[in-house]
Image: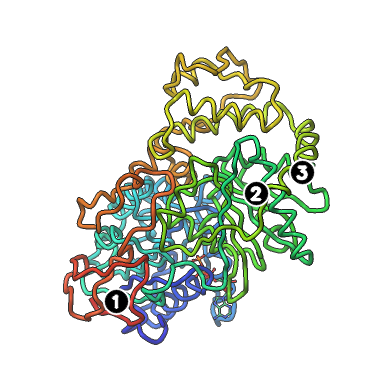
Amino acid sequence: KVLTELPSSSSECLVQAKTGTGKTIAFLLPALQALLSGKPLPSGQVGILILSPTRELALQIAKECDQITASLPQRLECHTAFGGTARASNLKKFLHGKPTVLVATPGRLNDYLTEESARGKFQDIRTLILDEADTMLEQGFLLAIKDILKKLPPKKAGWQGMCFSATIPAKVTDVVKIVLNPGYTHLSTVDQSEPPTVANVPQYFITIPRMMDTFNALFALIKLEYAHNPTEFKAIVFGTTANGVALLAALFTKLMPEFKVYQLQSRLSQSVRTRTTDEFKAASSGLMFASDVIGRGMDFPNVGHVFQLGLPASGEQYVHRVGRTARAGNDGRAVILLNENESYFPRINKLLPINPYPTDLAPHISSVSAEVSVAFESVDEVTKSKAYQAFLGFNKTFLKNLRLDTPGLVRMANEYANAMGCPEPPMVDKKVVGKMGLKGVMGLRVGTIERDEPPRQGPRQGLRQGPRPERAIENAVTNGKERWSTNGRNGSNGDAPLNNRWTRAGGQPLGNGTNGRNSGNTNTTRNGGGRGKRRGGAGGVDDRATKR
Ligand SMILES: Nc1ncnc2c1ncn2[C@@H]1O[C@H](COP(=O)(O)OP(=O)(O)OP(=O)(O)O)[C@@H](O)[C@H]1O
């Protein structure tokens, strides 16, 4: 659609297409075509700048760019800039190289742009692309994007803006004008009447009856799904916090030795994350336990199952997580496991085709509980303690959505600890209890913990301060404040007012009219950022190019 309906390869555009349908190549080809057919780029200048919300996605886009340009007569260098890698040596390569294409996360790029010499490399930029544009223009990243734009040539210098995502909530069309000129082309292949998730993925939910059964339910489910799909079983299990993911990986390494268990979350070193990403991409089977660092954009071939334990940050994030399976036309299955307090999520997201899981899991849960208890005996206490603390920190910010008070939260967390086989709730450092606002709450074991590990740089799990932008995805999920602030959908900015009881964080519903799309009338807006008559429906749009 982009290659045939964009007025020209250098046209400004906002593009929506479902997950796994080839958006990367859909922005790379026109951008490269425009660059190669335009006036020659001065040597050493960046021609195409692509911004990505996560480091792994930046690397993936760069690799796809290299695959495309490998067939060109003259070599085009594609550089990357993202956190967790050696700044000095990468910056030196960037300054002395010919980074015709640069794929970056906002945090590291802003860091580069503090250097005059780096700013000098963008004087002739031709195209700026926001992949996962809706998340790049949300609270967690928006300031960083604006900082970047202040250090680039102004929009009137004529560079092309391109924004791509599988989900385009209504509020995006307000903000997208910082990157797109009025009159940009809005293309979509997402039919308004369809759910925004890929069609060939049956989606189910399971309400876990007791916190005590959290891990039993996940194990029973994976076993059941594996039994039905024994060949090349390759699955991703999304957890809500980095430490919660680390616990799951440790547990399932013991529970399912027949699988290679992988984990990806923000507390791992970047070199481990990069290596693990490559390994899982190449794997024909395996179990990946991950946080939202791979919730969007990441292309792991032949993933047949996506499981989610706990709430996603929003309906949109749910769609992107499910989109890790059934890519490039393949099939897939998705199951979300929720505890009683989280069980509202399917109810407030009617636009998502999430049905009750077809098998009664109860007998399977009781049959695996002994095995899970034994496996937990070999998971170390520090891993459990960190997961417990992250559980408290994460859920503390969503008490209203979960309909809990602080004693109720501690009771839930202590049941979670009990499910891990902790004889008593892990101790929480009194300073952490204070920061969580849980001082004096019954049920907590408070003390002073001398951690042997060196204090981490930057924010601590569950108590994240202001995000380093490339961590914003992770933080947005693990720190309700981020998520809280990302939810501007109170109707005040003209969005269709949502069911406000649930729009505060914790599984925000997919917005009505989330696509911000006009009625499909090609002349409804002339200024690009304005609003035509908005149609309801979730992220769907009429299947026509609409010239704004
Ligand atoms: N025209 C095509 N023919 C065959 N395979 C394709 C084509 N275009 C893309 N693919 C493959 O489809 C997969 C998904 O592509 P891509 O990662 O760009 O999806 P996406 O739309 O960006 O997904 P997401 O919304 O999750 O970011 C990749 O493996 C890619 O190589």
Q: Can residue 86 be seen in this view?
A: no
The residue positioned 62% from the left and 74% from the top of the image is 330
Which numbered disc, 3 or 1, marks the residue closer to the eye? 3
- Reply above or below: 329 against 286: below
The residue positioned 66% from the left and 54% from the top of the image is 360
Disc 1 element: strand
Q: Residues within 10 Å of mark 2 (few under 14, many from 20)?
A: many
Residue pointed to by mark 2: 289
Nearer to the camera, 375 or 329: 375
Q: How far apart are marks 1 and 2 (CA)?
A: 38 Å
Q: Quadrant of residue 526?
A: bottom left
- What amino acid is found at the position of numbered circle 1 in the picture? Thr
The residue positioned 47% from the left and 66% from the top of the image is 101
**Marker disc for residue 185:** 1
Nearer to the camera, 175 or 150: 175
Residue pointed to by mark 3: 368
